[in-house]
Image (cartoon, helix red, strand yellow):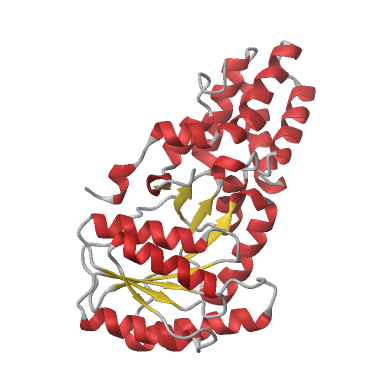
């Protein structure tokens, strides 16, 4: 069974409840109160979307598309507007999604995943859950504890490694992070491991030295296995809203992000940032976190995401 088979639509609906209330429930109340869809309705809808951290660019695109469609056809009920909004989001704002599955074959050595993100975003937990998922699929996993500045991070990874059956490569606190990454990749090659996941430090993303350190780690990994890391995942706490977009831009410029993991969607009404990040960065969202459980790190499916967001039954309609 692959990672995608673990997708739980009911858990996704539950996890998006706060964002659904912030967007769908408010839009429904808006149109119900006005009784029609007019320019005032669209202006108020614009405020709702921005308030849910969809972002000004994505919001403007949504409103422009809605205004055009409303002008071409007659929409007068809440259900009609919700249906139209859902259609617009599905088609125009969430075009970026990609398989979370590891390719069937990597030409040389294990599949290398480098994980970056600021402290507190859920990076260590994400690594643990990924390791658990891959091991449960029969893959052998090595974790490199290259966040050598936080003892707590290594302790957490050690617990996750024991729980999942992954092997942890670590050094003393304060060691060179690139050296840990080097050892982890070499160990994975020697063991003929399928996957190696490299944790990294997450001090403030505005610090130049952090970005230089991440670049060094990437260079070291690539020297050991040309063409790697095969995936560079940026973990973002969805509750940070638009700050998450800034993180994506800065980490992307430093190490070339290939995929995003959005955590803590279940605890925020700012899930609209998913739309903003996708539109601005054009980077695939690989996974989303909708809870603390092992199965609550789910592959991002744009159709399921929009369907869950606009589930009127879940929204209490």
Looking at the image, residue 279 lies above or below residue 113: above
In screen coordinates, is 159 left or right of 23?
Answer: left
Specify the farthest residue to the top.
35
Q: Residue at x 76, y 34 (%)?
A: 47
* Quadrant occupied by the C terminus: top right
Looking at the image, residue 304 lies above or below residue 105: above
Query: Residue 41, how many percent across, how many down?
Result: 75, 23
Q: Residue at x 68, y 34 (%)?
A: 63
Query: Residue 274, how many percent across, how many down?
Result: 57, 47
Decide which of 3, 190 is in the foreground and name it: 190
Decide which of 245, 164 is in the foreground and name it: 164
Looking at the image, residue 248 lies above or below residue 310: below
Rendered image quadrant of residue 43: top right
Q: Residue at x 35, y 86 (%)?
A: 183
Query: Residue 72, how many percent across, how many down?
Result: 62, 22
How many labels, in total?
A: 0
In screen coordinates, is 62 left or right of 109?
Answer: right
Query: Residue 151, how many percent across, how many down?
Result: 53, 75
Q: Residue at x 35, y 66 (%)?
A: 161
Does the image show residue 30? yes
Rendered image quadrant of residue 75: top right
Specify the farthest residue to the right.
40
Does the image show residue 71? no
């Amino acid at each position: 069974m692959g990672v995608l088979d673990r997708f739980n639509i009911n858990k996704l609906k539950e996890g998006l409840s706060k964002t659904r209330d912030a967007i769908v429930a408010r839009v429904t109340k808006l149109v119900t109160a006005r009784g029609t869809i007019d320019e005032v309705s669209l202006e108020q809808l614009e405020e709702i979307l921005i308030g849910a951290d969809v972002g000004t660019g994505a919001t403007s695109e949504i409103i422009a598309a809605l205004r055009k469609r409303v002008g071409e056809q007659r929409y007068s009920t809440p259900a009609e507007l919700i249906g139209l909004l859902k259609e617009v989001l599905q088609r125009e704002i969430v075009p970026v999604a990609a398989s979370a599955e590891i390719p069937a074959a990597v030409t040389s050595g294990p599949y290398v995943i480098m994980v970056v993100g600021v402290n507190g975003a859920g990076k260590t937990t994400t690594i643990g859950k990924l390791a658990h998922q891959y091991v449960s699929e029969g893959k052998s996993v090595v974790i490199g504890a290259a966040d050598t500045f936080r003892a707590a991070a290594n302790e957490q990874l050690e617990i996750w490694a024991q729980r999942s059956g992954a092997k942890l490569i670590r050094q003393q606190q304060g060691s060179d992070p690139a050296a840990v990454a080097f050892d982890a990749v070499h160990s994975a090659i020697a063991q003929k491991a399928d996957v190696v996941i490299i944790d990294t430090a997450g001090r403030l993303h505005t610090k130049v030295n952090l970005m230089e350190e991440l670049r060094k780690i990437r260079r070291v990994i690539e020297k050991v296995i040309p063409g790697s890391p095969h995936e560079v995942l940026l973990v973002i706490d969805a509750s940070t809203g638009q700050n998450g977009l800034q993180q994506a831009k800065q980490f992307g410029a430093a190490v070339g992000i290939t995929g995003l993991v959005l955590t803590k969607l279940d605890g925020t009404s700012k899930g609209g940032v998913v739309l903003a990040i996708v539109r601005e960065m054009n980077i695939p969202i690989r996974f989303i976190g909708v809870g603390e459980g092992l199965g609550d790190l789910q592959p991002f499916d744009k159709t399921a995401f929009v369907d869950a967001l606009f589930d009127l039954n879940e929204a209490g309609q």
